[in-house]
């Protein structure tokens, strides 16, 4: 599936997007964030405050305890602020 990174998550990971095959143990958005954090130093840095990361599945924002299913794309964002 396509994983897209935005803002400082993208800067820390060093990629705008990548295609990944997720392990069966990744069921929720939180599982995904935790799994990504284990992929190396850049990912650990990007997801060090994993509970603050926003997740969108096929362009719909979900909470980290929600299942991700089998989407075509998942986007990961830092916390958003209004203005």
Image (cartoon, rainbow, N blue to C red):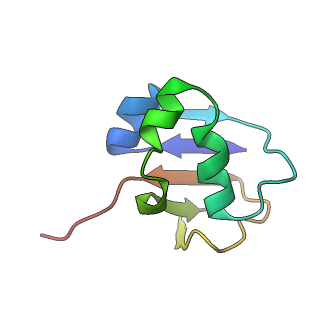
Q: Quadrant of residue 81?
A: bottom left
Quadrant showing the N terminus: top right
Q: Is residue 39 rendered to the left or right of residue 53?
A: right
Q: Position of residue 51 (x, y in %)?
A: 47, 61
Nearest the viewer among 56 and 9 is 9
- Residue at (83% x, 54% y) in the render: 25
Q: Quadrant of residue 40?
A: top right
Q: Is residue 41 above or below residue 82?
A: above
Q: Position of residue 22 (x, y in %)?
A: 78, 44
Q: Is residue 57 rendered to the left or right of residue 12?
A: right
Q: Is residue 25 rendered to the left or right of residue 42?
A: right
Q: Is residue 14 rendered to the left or right of residue 7?
A: right
Nearest the viewer among 19 and 40 is 40
- Residue at (53% x, 52% y) in the render: 75
Nearest the viewer among 54 and 18 is 54
Q: Position of residue 76 (x, y in %)?
A: 49, 52
Nearest the viewer among 29 and 61 is 29
Quadrant showing the C terminus: bottom left
The number of callouts visible is: 0
Q: Is residue 12 above or below residue 76?
A: above
Q: Residue furthest right?
A: 24
Q: Position of residue 29 (x, y in %)?
A: 63, 62
- Residue at (67% x, 45% y) in the render: 35
Q: Is residue 63 above or below residue 11?
A: below
Q: Residue furthest left?
A: 83
- Residue at (57% x, 40% y) in the render: 37
């Amino acid at each position: 599936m396509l994983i897209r990174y935005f803002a400082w998550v993208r800067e820390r990971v060093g990629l705008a997007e990548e295609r990944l095959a997720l392990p069966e143990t990744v069921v929720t958005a939180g599982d995904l964030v935790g799994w990504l954090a284990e992929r190396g130093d850049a990912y650990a840095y990007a997801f060090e405050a994993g509970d603050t990361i926003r997740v969108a599945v096929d362009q719909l924002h979900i909470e980290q305890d929600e299942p991700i299913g089998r989407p075509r794309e998942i986007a990961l964002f830092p916390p958003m602020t209004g203005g």
